[in-house]
Image (cartoon, helix red, strand yellow):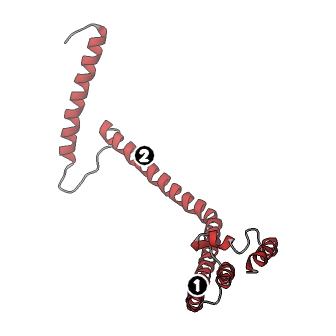
Amino acid sequence: MDAPPARAGDEEDEEEGDEAGPEGALAKSPLQLTADDVYDISYVVGRELMALGSDPRVTQLQFKIVRVLEMLEALVSEGGLAAEELRLERDSLRREVAALRAARPAAGPEELRDVLQERNKFKSQLLLVQEELQCYRSGLIPPREGPGGREKDVLVARTSSNKEERTIIRKLFSFRSGKQM
């Protein structure tokens, strides 16, 4: 059997080209296999079958192993193509995201500025309405005459509220000055 010495010499030649040699492909995860790894596995298995001799059972087994290796090669090649397609899609999405991020700052401040201006406009309108309401309540601005002569009702309500305010103010001042009502 001349196979063992030849095998040792072949391994040294293969290890110079590849760190782990053909046997290294057998140690890889199935998800990491490439077509070259399948060829390395084929080489290792073929060497072992040659070492077994020319028994008819070994020959039948050899044809089955070759078929399995062909199927493995096809699967690995398809997986490699799918992985390459996914890499291309990932790169495309990264470029798209980068373009969107680059475009966003230009549109972002304008959109934000518009929103802030609108908010400030509404806030100033609210303050004006609150001031006007305060003036109506204090009697500085006469109430507008509405339909049906509601001005009298408003005046009566305003005078009664003024009387209540005066009594509260009198009570407050009388309490401070020491007089009790």
Of labels 2 and 1, earlier in sequence is 1
Q: Residue at coordinates 59% horizontally, 77% vertically from top-left? A: 86
Where is residue 130 drawn, in percent x and y? 37, 44
Quadrant assignment, res 113: bottom right
What is the count of numbered marks? 2
Q: Which mark is residue 96?
A: none
Q: Nearer the viewer, mark 2 or mark 1?
A: 1
Q: Is residue 27 left or right of residue 11?
A: left
Quarter of the rendering containing residue 39: bottom right
The quadrant holding residue 176 is: top left
Residue on which disc 1 sits? 78
Residue under the image location 49 percent in, 57 percent down: 118
Give the residue type that dot 2 points to. Leu
- Looking at the image, residue 124 sits to the left or right of residue 10; the answer is left
Image quarter in which the C terminus is found: top left
In contact (CB < 8 Å): disc 2 and disc 1: no
Instruction: Tell me which amino acid carries mark 1.
Output: Glu
Q: Position of residue 62 (x, y in %)?
A: 59, 88
Find the residue positioned furthest to the top. 178
Q: Which residue is mark 2?
A: 127
Q: Secondary structure at mark 1?
A: helix
Task: Tell me where residue 112 appears, x and y as whole percent.
Answer: 55, 58
Q: Position of residue 135 (x, y in %)?
A: 35, 40
- Residue drawn at (63%, 62%) of the image: 105
Closer to us: 52 or 62? 52
Mark 2: few/some/many CA within 10 Å (<14, 14-19, 20+): few
- Residue with the most extreme front position: 1
